Image (tube, rainbow, N blue to C red):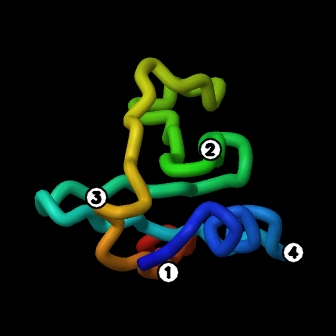
Amino acid sequence: MINARAFKERMDAQPFKPFRICLSDGKSFDVTNHDIAFVKSTTVEIGIELDANGFAEYCAGCAFIHITRIEDISTRKAA
């Protein structure tokens, strides 16, 4: 299980590498930059449904106990 410290290290990595959080209920959320997630002691709040300016419409709270894995995601655009 990932904890707050490990998640924060992932968020602070230079250069930042986008990743996907996969939860025990089957949901997943993409963390595309270090500004859209806020790490708390037992949860992480992730901004979702970003508008054209990068502002989140909503936030999803994800308890670390329910994060089953973190996957790297590609930022390359398909040709």
Residue bearing mark 2:
40
Task: Look at the numbered discs 3 and 2 and tell me whether their residues touch, using CB distance below 8 Å.
Answer: no
Residue bearing mark 4:
14
- 25 and 41: which one is in front? 41
Q: Secondary structure at mark 4?
A: loop
**How much space separates mark 3 and mark 4, taking CA atoms?**
23 Å
Determine whether, in the image, residue 33 is placed left or right of residue 21. Answer: right
Residue bearing mark 1:
72
**How much space separates mark 3 and mark 1, taking CA atoms?**
12 Å
Q: Decide: few, some or many residues near mark 2? Use Cα within 10 Å; few <14, some 14-19, many ≥20.
A: some
Q: Earlier in the sequence, mark 3 or mark 2?
A: 3
**How much space separates mark 4 and mark 2, taking CA atoms?**
21 Å
Task: Give the label on residue 28, or none.
Answer: 3
Residue at image position (62%, 31%) is 54
Q: Position of residue 69 (x, y in %)?
A: 36, 78
Residue most extreme to the right: 14
**How much space separates mark 4 and mark 1, taking CA atoms?**
14 Å
Q: Secondary structure at mark 3?
A: strand
Residue at image position (51%, 77%) is 74
Residue most extreme to the left: 25
Q: Quadrant of residue 30?
A: bottom left
Residue at image position (65%, 25%) is 53
For badge 1, the amino acid type reads Asp
